Amino acid sequence: MHLLVLGLGYTATRIAAAFSAGVGSVAATTRDGRAGTVRFDDARAVGAEIARATHILSSVPPADEADPVLLAYGPRLARSDAWLGYLSSTGVYGDTGGAWVDETAPTGTGRRSARNRADADWLALGARVFRLPGIYGPGRSALDRVREGRAHLVDTPGQVFSRVHVDDIVSGVIAARNAPPGAYNLADDRPCAQNDVIAFAAGLLGMDPPPFTPLDRLSPMARAFYAENRRVANGKARRVLRWTPLYPDYRTGLRALSAMTSPMPVSTAPAAASADQRYPSNSVESSIAITGTITLE
């Protein structure tokens, strides 16, 4: 199997590494063709990769009210027999007043009309459309925002959000490589208020929670984020993909991230080994080769 990743960003890089490690070869596009990837605007090279691919995944978000991938390569994708996947957003469900939504809920009411259209257009192509809530993971979590002084609490009673650890997106997409076309929500099991996440992260860091910030002092983008309120159900992904999130709530996810970044405890050095002791080598080469195009280390 050969996967073409259109847009090698934070999440897609991890999907590519997992695919190459256990499933098949991978090629990828970036804007500038860095690190052996294909330039997105190199139509001949991208066309050749589309023809070669058994699986094609786009993580490119809409831009200027259009989907750049469909705008540039939509006809070729429509003619392809490859498995198609698209990383979308649960924002297509819009504001539900905190109610649960699954894949049967109405879409197209989200605040970003271009995303709404892209979601619908990829479904029309026969893609597996992965609707994702707030994504967190190494280097991009409430722990980082609290540690760096960028986090804030906002007084929005009754407001809840869903989220998902990046590793659970990876496992969901890999599980869907033989799944039927359609929409799949990949979210954890416990939607909650953003304030709860920030306070828990501060506790893990041994810091006080940040102060409350009035909603009208936030950026327009942040205010738009708080304008929506919904709980995202993941039952279809569990049932059809046989997917189970490794991090079913923000507590388990943040604890795991905290363990990754916490300093190792200082301990007394062990006694020197005697001459007749023999230890096997612990050397492990950790680079992951992405066949033919890029190498992730």
Image (tube, rainbow, N blue to C red):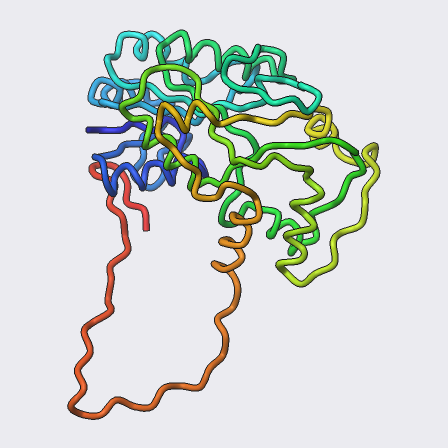
Residue located at (70% from left, 61% from top): 207
| Residue 33 image position (x, y, % from top left) | 35, 34
Residue located at (53% from left, 24% from top): 89
Which quadrant would residue 126 be assigned to in this image?
top left
| Residue 2 image position (x, y, % from top left) | 22, 29
Q: Nearer the viewer, residue 71 or 56?
A: 56
Above or below 34: residue 206: below
Q: Nearer the viewer, residue 186 or 283?
A: 186
Residue located at (32% from left, 37% from top): 16
| Residue 13 image position (x, y, % from top left) | 38, 39
Side of 118 where 126 appears, left or right:
left
Above or below 267: residue 104: above
Side of 271 where 260 appears, left or right:
right
Side of 292 where 215 appears, left or right:
right
| Residue 189 image position (x, y, % from top left) | 53, 35
Residue located at (55% from left, 23% from top): 90
Q: Quadrant of the N terminus?
A: top left
Above or below 147: residue 74: above
Q: Nearer the viewer, residue 218 or 35?
A: 218
